[in-house]
Amino acid sequence: MSDAVVKRILVVDDEPDVRTYLCTALEDAGFLVETASDGLEALESIRREPPDLISLDLVMPRHSGARLYHELQKDKKLSKIPVLIVTGHARDEMGQADFEEMTMSGPGVYLEKPVRPVSYVSAVRRLLGLENAEPEPAPEGLRRELFQAMSGADQEALRRALDALKKK
Amino acid sequence: MMNIMIPPELETLLGRGLFEHVPFNVAFIDRDFNIVAANKSFEEYFGDWRRKKCHEVYKDSLRRCAGCHAQETFEDGRVRVSDETGVDRHGRACHYVVHLAPVKDDGQKVQYIIEMTIDLTETRRWQREYDLFLERVPCCVLVVDRQFRIIRDNEKFRQTFGDGRGKLCYEVCKRRKTICKNCPADLTFKDSAEHTSSQVGVHRDGTPAYYVVTSSALSRGAGGVAHVIEMATDVTEVRHLQGELREAQDYYESLIRNSGTGILAVDMLNRAKVMNHAARALLGWNIGRLPGPRRLRQMLPAEFFASNLGEGKALDLSETLIRPRQGPEVPVRFSAVGLRSRGKQLGRAAFLQDLREIKSLEQDKLEAERLAAVGQTVAGLAHTVKNLLMGLEGGMYMVDSGLHRGDAARIADGWEILQRNFEKTTALVKDFLSFAKGRVPDLRPTDPVALARSVVELYRDAARMQGVELVLEPGEVIAEALLDPDGIETALTNLVSNAIDAAALREAPGGKVVLHTRDDAKDLLFEVSDNGCGMDWEVKGKVFTTFFTTKGGKGTGLGLLTTRKIVQEHGGRLEMESAVGEGSLFRMRFPRQRLQTLAEAAARSVNGKSAGAVPNEGKS
């Protein structure tokens, strides 16, 4: 693969704001971007013109990301397309099972919402085998703490929150 | 013959009167065996005797009898008694005893014989009957003399104790060497009265014999009572049955006494006859005597007295209250049956099962369900916040990069995203606060149909604007229920607005939402159905487990969760049925019994914490 060829990315997310955001970030990094708001729309788009990479949300109302992913795996040609999972459900009961199954069997690359633009673009580039222009700057201050807190919201933390509510 | 001086005026009277009035037959015969005189009794017994020989009259025979006793008496002048059979005036065989007494002249020669006959025919028959009776009577009979020697026994006695004749009664009956204590025969010998006592003897096979014996004086002699007849009834079998009966009674009594279920039985006049420990404890009945009808009516449910239990119908109240002698009412499961024996009504029995423990367990379960709902909510909240942060991150990037590039359009887009996500954050916080508040529903008697109608009226116009018809289908008469009207209204509002949105998304026109209220067995149901797009299995699987919205930016995903939380706080369930392209149905199911339990718990906790107002204890 070479930088000379413009890579096509398909962004699948049911949130329009998220689509706009990811789309803009990727375009700024020089990619060609298509969007789809759910699994069905994405499948159509992929069949019409297979992208070089799929950025996929897991939980969507109509035809989820997990389902789309399984369908792609069944297709010999489409199963080779790298998939970057962008999800807020990696750790909760709604997405966990799907998520674990997919990361074990497939792409192994995921980003947990909220995603910073630099991290996102870097992950896309890595999956496509492209060099990253510059190292990813670490998030700072309060935002970093919040990031860590959000991605580390584990069972124990939830139990504490629950206890606090019970006492109320 | 007559040495006694008899006044002459009595002489003829005696001669004729005595002769005619003695209660037996009298005849005189001469030495030629002619009957020369006889009284009326004789004539009535043997018939005409005039100019007849004695053997013609007595025996209907022309010849003299062989071994004639009269002949002997004529010869030796001695009195004879003889047992004879002959023929009566009707030609029937008869049985009699005859006394022959000589009438001598001065030379001591026997000139006549007086023959006095007494009929034995009847007596013989009696004797045979008596013997038969004595032998075959189904109780033991024995006659003892003053030495307690058995001079007579019967068949039953011999079967029971063995042959006893000639032996001592205590040896035969008890296999002992001395007279028994409390011997009834001994008492009868002493006072000639009748005596009865219970005795334990030994059967001929060696097993114990229980019998009741009665003794009576039979004959008297010079020393008082000479013979005593004893009649004994063998009660071994009866005793055995009594033992079994007592055993069975002890068995059932112990079952009743130790049952954890309260058992109470009354007679036909509703007086308590049986009341076990559990029943006493439940009713606080710690005094000795059992309650009468008036007290029972105060304590037990009216159905127990009203129901026609005698006809084999049983009563089963799955939950009711009893009013103990002291203290608060106790919730019990109350069942009752009529008691009968061989078609005869004896009374009724009630079974009381304490529900306090079960109710407290149910309370714990309700609490656990509610906390589980809160836990899921908190988990879902994290996800929603993540999505909001994602939107904010995106908006910031757009504004940032727009500023960097001097791209005003991008700045405007980014600002819009920021605004939108800020609004969503505000909405989420607002929803979450409403979600988090009022964790204990304020239950009060509420008309479910009126509540549903108010929601339908509120949303009907809004639905019409979206081309959706919203209708209420109230079921048959639905009783009031203990509900938190505000909470249920919120829940119904959420379900109805979801349904309207789903019906509006339908491709063909004719969107319709139905709110149906009904009772199903012991549950109160609210059903909201739409003919909208329906949900596939993925959505169905996830719709209840976290914040989830199919409405893009419009929803926070809290509506259905809030609904479910409210339903769970009422001890109910939120159920869902859906098919893609056909529509969805959401059903709130409230077991009325649980509503009752919750209301009672709430009343208790209010009473426990303060002297505040007790919530209305309306019953559905």
Image (cartoon, rainbow, N blue to C red):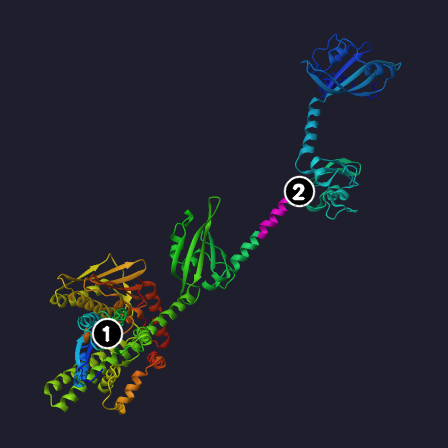
- Quarter of the picture containing the N terminus of chain B is top right
Select label 2 or label 1 by which is in front: 1
Q: Position of residue A49 (x, y in %)?
A: 18, 73
Q: Name the mark on residue B557.
A: 1
Q: Position of residue B460 (x, y in %)?
A: 14, 65
Q: Please count the marks in the image.
A: 2
- Residue B9 sits in quarter: top right
Taken as a whole, is the magenta stretch helix, strand or loop?
helix
Q: Check disc 2 and report the residue beneath it.
A: B234
In the image, residue B124 sits, relative to residue B569, either above or below, namely: above
Q: Secondary structure at mark 1?
A: loop
- Asked if residue B445 lies in the magenta stretch, the reply is no
In the image, residue B42 sits, relative to residue A63, either above or below, namely: above
Left or right of B494? Residue B322 is right
Q: Which residues are magenta?
A: B237-247
Q: Residues within 10 Å of mark 2 (few under 14, many from 20)?
A: many
Q: Which comes sooner in the sequence, label 2 or label 1?
A: 2
- Residue B251 sits in quarter: bottom right
On the question of residue B552 being in view, the answer is: yes
| Between B121 and B541, the one nearer to me in the picture | B541
On the question of residue B612 being in view, the answer is: no
- Chain letter of mark 2 equals B
